[in-house]
Image: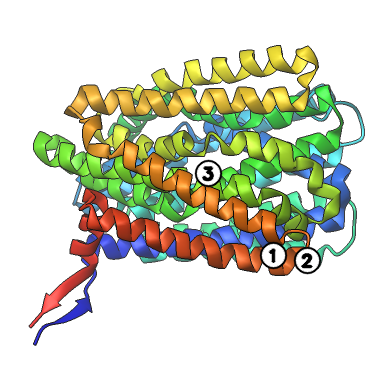
Amino acid sequence: MSQVRIKLSPFVAKIAQTGLAMGANLVATMVVIRLLARELGPDEFGAYALARRIIANMGPLLLLSLDIGLRRFLAVVSDRKSRAGYVVAALAIIGPMFATLLIVGIIFERALSDLVFGGPGHYNLYRSLFIFLGGYAIAMVVYASYLGLEQVGRANALLLMLFSCAPVAVALAIGERRDAALPVRLMGAALYFAGLPLMVLLSRLGWPGVRSVQNAAGQLLRFGVPRVPAALAFACLLSVGPVLAPHFGALKDAGFFAVSIYVLRALQTGVDGFGLVVLPKIAQAAAANDTEFLRSKLEAVVAMILHLGLFATAALWIWAPDALILWLGPAYAEATSTLRIVAISFTPFLGYTMLYSIIDGLDERAINTRHLLPALATATLVGLSLGWSRLGVLGLAVGTTAGLALLGLLSVGYLIRRVGLNLRRLDITTALVLNGAAGALASALRASITNHVRVGPLLVLGVVAELALFATYVYVLYRRRTPWVQEIKRRVFAEAT
């Protein structure tokens, strides 16, 4: 008699572990946003959200994409001296970059603060940005090093401690102090604790020697610098709406728009670990010129992006009003329209976030930069045009959606050219039909009960219904022998006799 047992391969186990860690980070982020949104109020929360978007924009200038380079190069070298060279080189490059940003920031403090936050009165918040950036740089070097060395458990532990637990503790500790600078300052200070595992890592790797550091620095810069425009463009693509929102409305509109970006990023957190873990594998397959392997695997990945993205988009569109009220409170119900517009871009956004690491593994050229620059230009031009034509913040949301849609299409287009991706194998028609039916059923359920139950029970019923619909959806795809579903079954479940 045969029985089915679960047996995760090491590769799938790493993806699952990273996905769980990022899922926990997602929960922590949602808790932090809920606490701060209610404690700070819409205006100060808008200032906090805008500050976090500015940090996201400055991150690429500080890191120079060395975090991606570390993951890639540490995965393909095995001797301790070479690995130490890359880690030390990354620190040697990032240190002066942080000093430069800090000096410029101090010299032009008032002008830059007034420009970013739309007027005087936020100087403490502006200074807190640099406290955060210094700790962030250290934490990202350690995190990227762990991933490149395939020490996924340690990378996830760092993620949970510094990017999940610490922010929750800060949000709980500040109480009702309506000062957006305080949480930014305290969260940034917590990131400096990453210096402890960094010292342990360096002591284990040993001193690599000056020449090794110089060689590694050259490789990291050649790999990373051409990718800075891509990282910066992606950060700006997600920030153009929140940054411009106060100019088409009020400071609280930056917070409303930022909530939409938070939700967008939260929905892809569960699968984002795939891209982080798969980069070393893709780099190895590309180095071996195994085109057939790449084609079959990437067709399954793109199909999964399409199938999961469409389902999540429909669910978010339907339940967004109720989720926002329960999560943040009635004061943030105004964010519903913005969220629904941005939600349309979730599938291409998911495509880019899952495929950018794969593209980096396939090609040392800055391919993502070539995709991101026109996407950013589209988001900015469309957003400003519609924003000035009486649509205001909603016009900015349409611009962001248009930019992200173009970005996803360009990423898939590259794979079609690079590995011969076949769109006919993605089962697009089936996905559209099934998601249309699931969306209609969920909409009918919400319409029938929304006036009879409170928001909390309504969302509980909604979650139960969406889980049932999702299980049915995946089962139908399984019966149709959809490759990505079959691949998961093959890797997770094993027949034992």
Q: Who comes first in sequence, dot 3 or dot 1?
A: 3
Residue at 52% x, 60% y is 466
Mark 3 and mark 1: span between their CA atoms? 19 Å
**Which quadrant of the structure image shows residue 348?**
top left
- Asked whether the residues under the numbered discs 3 and 1 touch, taking CB atoms below 8 Å apart as contact, a structural biologist would say no
Looking at the image, which is closer to me, 85 or 431? 431
Which structural element holds mark 2? loop
Mark 3 and mark 2: span between their CA atoms? 24 Å
Looking at the image, which is closer to me, 366 or 340? 340
On the rendered structure, is 307 left or right of 116? left
**Which quadrant of the structure image shows residue 55?**
top right
Which residue is the site of mark 1? 458
Residue at 53% x, 57% y is 195
Residue at 21% x, 25% y is 418
Tell me residue 67's x, y (percent).
42, 41
The residue type indicated by label 2 comes to Arg
The residue type indicated by label 1 comes to Leu
Tell me residue 467's x, y (percent).
49, 64
Residue at 67% x, 40% y is 339
Q: Which mark is residue 313?
A: 3
